[in-house]
Image (spheres, coloured by chain):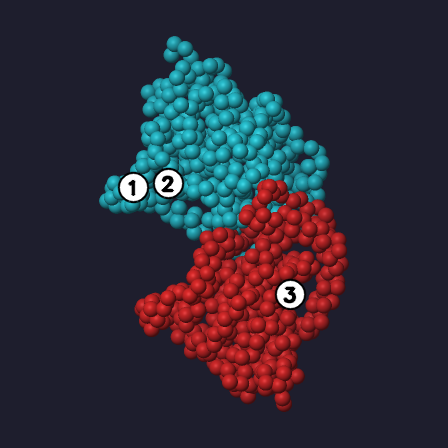
Chain colours: A red, B cyan
C-alpha cells in the first residue's frame, strides 16, 4: 500500500482492557531499605500503576502525538514480504532541506525524536534545515512486524533505506543511537552511495587493535586516559556487570520473557521504566511522560514481545556488528554524552568510521534526543551545516534555509 | 512460635482471582517455525493456560500435597528476627535409629521435589538404611516467610535456617541431600556446621569452575594433562549451552530481581512460561503432564511470599561471592550423583578438590531435577552412601538407619 496518512487511534476496547488489567494488578513484595539496588522500587511502580489506571489521560496524549505528521506505507523486505511501516515525516519549508533519517532503538520509539523535529526542520539563518523521517522499526510503535525468523541488522537497514527511497530521498543522512547505531552502521555498509553521512550518540567500539588500527592503537598507547575516559570506562564495565541482564535474556529467550511483557502492564512498565531512569542523566520524568512512553509499547501494533526479538536476531545472526577492519569512508560524526551506557575513550570512536566530527557534552544520557534535544540538534546542525565536515554531502540539498 | 501442623488450603478467593487473571491473559505473537529457539513455544503455553483456567484441579493437587506431613515453626535468623518456616517432616517408622536427612531444594524447585524420593528413603527394610526426611521451603519459597532485609537471602543465611530447623526438630546430627541452590546452601552448611552437626552431604549438582593455577596449582597441573572423557565432552558442551543460551534468567535475577518480580508476581502466564522453560530444557526428556507442570507452577503462584521473593537468592548469593569454588575444603564425607543432562558439568576431579568425596555415581539418564525425574536412581545413591558397607555408613552416631541388632 502506498503512503496513507496515519493517526493513532487506540480502540476504546483496548483502553477498557488495559484498565481491567491494571485493576487486577498484583504487586510483588519488596525488601526493607532496598532502594534501587534490587530493581525498580515498589513505590514508583505502585504510583505509576495507580496513575495509569486513574488520572492518566491517554486520549489527550494521543491527540498530542497526532499533531505529528504520521503516515504508513508498505515496504517490501527481501525474504519477509511487505511490511506496513509507520513513520513520522516532518518536512521543512525549505526546498533543499537535507533528508535525515532518525533510527530509534530499544526501549525507544518514534516519539523520542519529537523534540528534535522543530529544531531540525526550521532554524535561524545560518543553521541548516532538514526533512526528518522517523520510522517505527518493525515490531515497534505502529509498524507491522515480520512473521519470519532472521530479521536482523541488514533487514532493519533495508526497510529504513527503502523507506527513504520511497519518499523520494535517494540521498540522505542518518542519526541514530542504541539499535539505531547498529542499523545506521549497516546502512553505511550496504548503501554508502545513498546514506552520505552518519551521526551517532552511541559509538560502540572496542579498543583499537594493533592489527586493524595501528596508528590509533599507538596513539591510544601513548595518550594517558583523561578523568572522563576513566569514568567512562568504569561506567561501561559497571553496565556490563550489573546492567545487562535484560540484554542477555532478550538475546537468548525473548519468547519466554515476552509472555510477561505482553500480559502484564505493570511488568512491562517496570521493565522499561528501569531503563528510562537508569539510562538517563537525571531526566525529570513526569509520571504521564513515562506512561505515554510505556503505552506506546503496550498499545503497539505488534505487541510488546515483538520489540525485543531484535536482540535475539542480531545476536543470532552473529552479524559481525563490530567490524574494526571495515573501511566506512563516509563522514562520521559522534556526540558524546556522559551518561551513555558505554562511554569508552573518545579516541576509540576513530575505529568505527571516518570520524570527522566530535562533540563532547557534560550532560545527557542514552536518550539524548529526548533529554537534551537542543544539544543534539546543535551538533547535527554543526556537522551538516556550512563550514561543517559533512556540509553538502547530499547533492543539491545543503540545508540552507533560504530558498 | 513452636511447631504447628500445616495443611495447605489456598482460599477460594485466591482461586477465583487466578481464574480472573487467566481469563484476561493476553498472549504475545510468535514467529513461524520458532519451535523452542526463542523460548517456551506459544502452543504449549496456550494449552497450559487453557488447562489452568479450566480443567486443572488445584484442590486435588492440594490433597496430594497434604498427604505429606507438613508443619511450620518460627526460626530465629541472627540479625534479622524470626522467619516462619514451612517444611515436610516425615519420620521413619524405624524410630530413633533412622538417619535424619535434610533435603534442600533450589530454583525453580520447591519442597515437593522431595515427594518421590521421600517414601523410598523412609521405607523400612533390612536391606536399606532408613531416614527421617525433612524438606523445608526455603525463605521466600512455598509456604515459608521471605527474608525481609537486604543480604538475608544468601546461601549462608539459608544454611543457618536449615541448620536451626534440624536442631529444633531434635536432630543435632544429620545429613543433607540437595541440588541447585540446595547445593550451595548445604555446601555452606557442612562448612559452618560440619563434623559436629552435618555428618555427611550428598548432591546431584556440582557447579564448579576449573582449578586455577594461582589457587589450586597441583589440581591445575593435573587437569592440564588429564584427557577428556566422552562424558566430559558432553558435559562441557551442555555447560557451554547453558552459559551462553540459557543464562539470561540468571543474569537478570542476580542483578535486577525486583524489576523482573513485577512481571512474575502479576502475570500467571508470565510466571508459567518463565518456570516451564526450565522444567523442560533442564530435564532429560522428562514426560511432564500438563497437570504436573501446573501443580508445580501453582506452588509458586500461591506461595506465601509471592513469586518475586524466590528470585532474591540470586542477587544476595552472587553479591556475597558464594558461587564457584569459593569454599574451604572440609573432611565431611561427600557423595555425588552425576546425571547426564545436568546444566553445569564439572569433572569428578574438581569436586574432589573442594570436598572429601567418598561416593561418585554416574548415571545415563536424568537431568537437573533428579529427585523428580529419577527418584529411584537418586534414592539408590543415597542408600548406597549410608547403607551397610557404604562409605558413610554410621556417620550419625547411634543412627545407622537399621533396626537394632542388624
Name the residue at 64% across, 70% down.
Answer: A114
Q: Residue at x 49, y 38 (%)?
A: B154
In the image, taking residue A146 as reference, residue A71 lies left or right, namely: right
Q: Chain of mark 3?
A: A
Q: Which mark is residue A252?
A: none
The residue beneath circle 3 is A142
Discs 2 and 1 share one subunit = yes
Residue bearing the label numbered 2: B325
Instruction: Determine the residue positioned at 41% across, 70% down.
Output: A347
Instruction: Please say whether residue A361 is visible from this viewpoint.
Output: yes
Pointer 1 local density, CA inside 10 Å: few below 14, some 14–19, many at least 20: few
Q: Quadrant of residue A69?
A: bottom right
Where on the picture, by quarter, is residue B191?
A: top left
Task: Look at the picture and state if A88 lies above or below B207.
Answer: below
Where is residue A322? Give x, y as percent.
42, 66
Do the CB atoms of the residues marked 3 and 2 lie less than 8 Å apart? no
Q: Nearer the viewer, residue A285 or A141?
A: A285
- Asked if disc 2 and disc 1 are in contact, CB closer than 8 Å, the reply is yes
Q: Could you give the CA–CA distance between mark 1 and mark 3, rounded to whole angstroms?
A: 57 Å
Q: Is residue B385 left or right of residue B88?
A: left
Q: Which residue is mark 1?
A: B216
The chain to which mark 2 is attached is: B
Q: Is residue B244 left or right of residue B352?
A: right
Judge the density around disc 2: few (<14), some (14-19), many (≥20) Cα neighbours within 10 Å. Answer: some
Furthest toward the top, the residue is: B405
- The location of residue B358, given as percent across then percent down, is 33, 28
- Of badges 1 and 3, nearer the viewer stands 1
Amino acid at each position: 500500500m502506498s503512503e496513507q496518512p496515519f493517526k493513532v487511534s487506540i480502540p476504546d476496547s483496548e483502553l477498557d482492557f488495559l484498565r481491567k488489567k491494571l485493576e487486577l494488578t498484583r504487586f510483588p513484595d519488596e525488601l526493607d531499605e532496598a532502594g534501587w539496588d534490587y530493581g525498580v522500587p515498589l513505590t514508583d511502580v505502585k504510583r505509576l500503576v495507580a496513575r495509569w489506571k486513574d488520572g492518566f489521560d491517554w486520549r489527550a496524549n494521543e491527540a498530542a502525538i497526532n499533531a505529528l505528521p504520521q503516515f504508513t506505507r508498505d515496504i517490501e523486505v527481501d525474504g519477509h514480504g511487505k511490511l506496513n511501516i509507520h513513520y513520522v515525516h516532518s518536512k521543512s519549508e525549505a526546498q533543499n532541506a537535507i533528508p535525515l533519517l532518525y533510527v530509534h532503538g530499544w526501549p525507544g520509539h518514534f516519539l523520542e525524536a519529537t523534540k528534535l523535529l522543530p529544531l531540525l526542520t526550521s532554524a535561524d539563518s545560518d543553521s541548516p534545515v532538514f526533512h526528518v523521517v522517523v520510522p517505527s522499526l518493525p515490531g515497534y510503535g505502529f509498524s507491522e512486524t515480520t512473521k519470519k525468523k532472521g530479521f536482523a541488522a541488514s533487514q532493519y537497514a533495508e526497510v529504513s533505506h527503502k523507506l527513504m527511497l520511497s519518499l523520494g530521498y535517494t540521498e540522505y543522512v542518518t542519526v541514530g543511537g542504541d539499535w539505531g547505531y547498529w542499523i545506521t552502521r549497516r546502512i553505511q555498509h550496504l548503501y554508502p552511495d545513498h546514506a552520505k553521512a552518519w551521526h551517532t550518540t552511541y559509538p560502540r567500539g572496542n579498543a583499537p587493535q594493533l592489527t586493524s588500527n595501528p596508528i590509533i592503537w599507538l596513539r591510544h598507547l601513548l595518550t594517558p586516559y583523561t578523568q572522563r575516559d576513566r569514568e567512562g570506562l568504569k561506567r561501561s564495565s559497571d553496565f556490563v556487570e550489573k546492567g545487562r541482564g535484560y540484554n542477555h535474556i532478550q538475546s537468548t529467550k525473548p519468547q519466554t520473557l515476552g509472555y510477561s511483557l505482553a500480559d502484564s502492564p505493570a511488568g512491562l512498565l517496570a521493565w522499561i521504566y528501569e531503563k528510562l531512569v537508569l539510562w538517563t542523566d537525571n531526566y525529570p520524568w513526569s509520571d504521564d511522560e513515562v506512561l505515554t512512553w510505556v503505552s506506546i509499547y503496550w498499545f503497539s501494533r505488534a505487541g510488546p514481545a515483538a520489540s525485543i526479538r531484535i536482540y535475539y536476531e542480531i545476536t543470532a545472526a552473529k552479524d559481525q556488528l563490530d567490524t574494526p577492519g571495515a573501511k566506512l569512508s563516509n563522514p562520521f560524526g559522534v556526540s558524546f554524552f556522559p551518561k551513555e551506557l558505554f562511554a569508552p575513550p573518545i579516541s576509540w570512536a576513530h575505529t568505527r568510521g571516518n570520524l570527522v566530527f566530535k562533540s563532547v557534552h557534560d550532560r545527557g544520557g542514552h536518550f539524548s534526543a529526548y533529554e537534551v534535544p537542543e544539544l543534539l540538534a546543535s551538533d547535527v546542525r554543526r556537522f551538516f551545516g556550512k563550514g561543517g565536515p559533512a556540509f553538502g554531502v547530499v547533492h543539491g540539498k545543503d540545508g540552507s534555509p533560504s530558498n | 512460635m513452636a511447631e504447628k501442623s500445616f495443611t495447605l488450603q489456598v482460599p477460594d478467593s485466591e482461586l477465583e482471582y487466578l481464574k480472573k487473571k487467566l481469563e484476561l491473559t493476553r498472549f504475545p505473537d510468535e514467529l513461524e517455525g520458532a519451535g523452542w529457539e526463542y523460548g517456551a513455544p506459544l502452543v504449549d503455553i496456550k494449552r497450559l493456560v487453557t488447562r489452568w483456567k479450566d480443567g486443572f484441579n488445584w484442590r486435588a493437587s492440594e490433597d496430594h500435597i497434604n498427604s505429606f506431613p507438613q508443619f511450620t515453626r518460627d526460626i530465629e535468623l541472627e540479625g534479622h528476627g524470626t522467619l516462619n518456616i514451612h517444611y515436610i517432616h516425615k519420620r521413619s517408622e524405624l524410630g530413633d535409629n533412622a538417619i535424619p536427612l535434610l533435603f534442600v531444594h533450589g530454583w525453580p524447585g520447591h519442597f515437593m521435589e522431595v515427594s518421590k524420593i521421600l517414601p523410598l528413603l523412609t521405607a523400612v527394610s533390612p536391606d536399606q538404611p532408613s531416614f527421617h526426611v525433612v524438606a523445608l521451603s526455603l525463605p521466600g519459597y512455598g509456604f515459608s516467610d521471605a527474608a525481609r532485609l537486604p543480604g538475608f537471602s544468601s546461601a549462608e543465611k539459608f544454611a543457618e535456617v536449615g541448620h536451626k530447623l534440624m536442631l529444633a526438630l531434635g536432630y543435632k546430627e544429620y545429613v543433607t541431600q540437595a541440588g541447585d541452590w540446595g547445593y550451595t546452601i548445604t555446601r555452606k552448611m557442612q562448612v559452618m556446621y560440619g563434623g559436629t552437626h552435618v555428618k555427611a552431604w550428598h548432591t546431584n549438582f556440582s557447579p564448579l569452575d576449573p582449578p586455577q593455577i594461582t589457587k589450586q596449582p597441583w589440581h591445575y597441573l593435573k587437569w592440564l594433562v588429564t584427557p577428556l572423557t566422552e562424558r566430559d565432552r558432553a558435559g562441557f558442551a551442555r555447560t557451554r549451552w547453558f552459559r551462553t543460551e540459557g543464562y539470561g534468567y540468571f543474569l537478570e535475577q542476580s542483578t535486577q530481581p525486583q524489576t523482573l518480580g513485577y512481571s512474575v508476581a502479576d502475570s500467571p502466564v508470565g510466571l508459567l512460561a518463565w518456570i516451564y522453560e526450565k522444567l523442560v530444557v533442564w530435564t532429560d526428556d522428562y514426560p511432564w503432564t500438563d497437570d504436573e507442570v501446573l501443580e508445580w507452577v501453582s506452588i509458586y503462584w500461591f506461595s506465601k511470599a509471592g513469586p518475586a521473593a524466590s528470585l532474591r537468592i540470586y542477587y544476595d548469593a552472587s553479591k556475597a561471592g558464594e558461587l564457584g569454588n569459593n569454599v574451604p575444603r572440609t573432611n565431611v564425607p561427600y557423595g555425588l550423583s552425576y546425571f547426564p543432562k545436568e546444566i553445569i558439568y564439572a569433572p569428578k576431579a574438581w569436586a574432589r578438590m573442594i570436598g572429601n568425596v567418598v561416593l561418585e555415581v554416574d548415571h545415563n539418564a536424568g537431568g537437573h531435577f533428579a529427585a523428580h525425574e529419577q527418584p529411584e536412581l537418586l534414592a539408590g545413591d543415597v542408600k548406597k552412601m549410608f547403607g551397610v558397607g557404604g562409605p558413610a555408613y554410621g556417620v550419625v552416631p547411634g543412627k545407622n538407619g537399621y533396626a537394632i541388632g542388624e
